[in-house]
Amino acid sequence: MNFDDTPQEAAFRETARKWIEANAPKELHGELSKSSLGRIRLANHDIVDVGKAWQKKKFEGNWACLHWPREYGGRGATPIEKVIWQQEEGVYGKLTQPFQIGEGMCGPTVMAFGSEEAKRRYLPKLASGEEIWCQLFSEPSAGSDVAGLRTRAEKKGDNWVVNGQKIWTSGAHYSDYGLLIARTDPNVPKHKGLTMFFLDMKSPGVEVRPIRQANGMQEFNEVYFTDVVIPDSQRLGAVGDGWNVSLTTLMNERMSIGARLATGVPEMFELCSNLMLEDGLAIDDPAVRSKLASWAAKSNGLKYTSYRTISALSKGERPGPENSIGKLVSGMMLQDIATYAMDLQGAAGVLTGNDEETAQGQFQQMLLSSPSMRIAGGTDEILRNIIAERVLGLPGDIRVDKDVPYNKIPTKGR
């Protein structure tokens, strides 16, 4: 494959570069450049407010959700043009963090299964940054087994009444809408009794409780549903076909996470180029250089593996199970690099602050954040099963409850 730009792609890149140069909030460039490790923090701005402003400006310039059809708020761009845009947007792409779930996961699901009325109503406002979406999948009792969820939706006339709980919902505290999967039939095997909906997060009966994380931030939430009413018009896909609908969301989720997750490789090279050990610069130590070489090789492997997804998208195909590779590898790298950086720094690794202590604080945040990255979008174990079965074609894992009606599966507290 030739990775050089074609004349058309080069022209697109130049246009994108000029627009970004003229419109990007350059006053935030320094902070955004330093926030790639751990979580994004801006000293004098709220990331949601700044993100909305940048998203709106992109929308007005026809650069938001640019791979979406024009009638839904996009540009109708090719997958390659989307990649070029992300490359040129650079650090300013971090400002779109509040919209990544909506653009990368919820939007494509609504586009695939929503009514034409729903698509024209909700997608342009998502693309413009006017409305933010979250994903309501994980539950305390189910872990990474999405099909093991307990949240119930019961049909009452033209509405559904939802009761239950979700957890680890990123951005629920500032989201306007949420993609919700619930159990609508407990009398069939767990994968067959699910249905997908979307709901207004301000609906009566929805309660959001932020979760304090180890790194001091509150990005995840518990969400409780008490007799929440959802119109049947906000159902996505057929009743009982929620698992199939969720595959679109999950495949896009792993593609989105794997493509955007910072591994810390450039920052690690910079640290080792400036960190003095007992025998000199860290980068001159053979053991350190061996580690750096290994991570550089993996980083490039991730980069070129992502072209599988680009090829599939360019053919109009749904993102496939190969996206699990990028998410699995980058999540592990994130934690490994942070751990090694802290080891190299010794006691200095516990420091946080400004100036010369910035690197220590960044890697500390990275280490505290890294476990969540190995859970979000599927745990390492789930991803390994997907890769083994659906990419490598190995025999499936034993699932003793596969054909058992959900209400017959032995469990506590049902």
Image: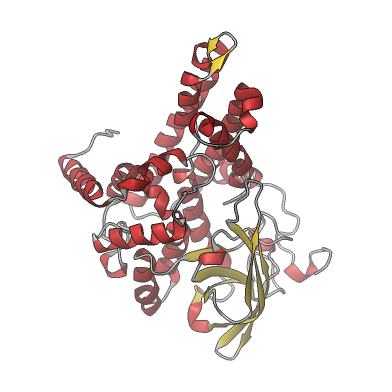
Q: Which residue is at the far bottom?
A: 157
Numbered disc total: 0
Question: Between residues 163 and 348, which one lies in front from this camera angle?
Answer: 348
Q: Is residue 243 above or below residue 393?
A: below
Residue 289 horizontal/vertical position (percent): 51, 16
Q: Is residue 302 above or below residue 241?
A: above
Q: Is residue 370 above or below residue 194?
A: above
Q: Residue at x 40, y 57 (%)?
A: 51
Q: Is residue 229 above or below residue 165?
A: below
Classify the position of the N terminus by image quarter.
top left
Residue 290 horizontal/vertical position (percent): 53, 16
Residue 31 falls left or right of residue 197: left
Q: Residue at x 36, y 51 (%)?
A: 313
Q: Which image quarter: residue 369?
A: top right
Question: Between residues 70 and 96, which one lies in front from this camera angle?
Answer: 96
Residue 94 horizontal/vertical position (percent): 42, 48
Residue 356 falls left or right of residue 379: left
Residue 394 horizontal/vertical position (percent): 61, 40
* Visual colour scheme: secondary structure
Classify the position of the C terminus by image quarter.
bottom right
User: Would residue 320 be visible to someone looking at this image?
Assistant: no
Q: Which image quarter: residue 182?
A: bottom right
Q: Residue at x 56, y 58 (%)?
A: 170
Q: Residue at x 45, y 54 (%)?
A: 97
Q: Which image quarter: residue 364?
A: top right
Question: Between residues 180 and 215, which one lies in front from this camera angle?
Answer: 215
User: Would residue 284 be visible to someone looking at this image?
Assistant: yes
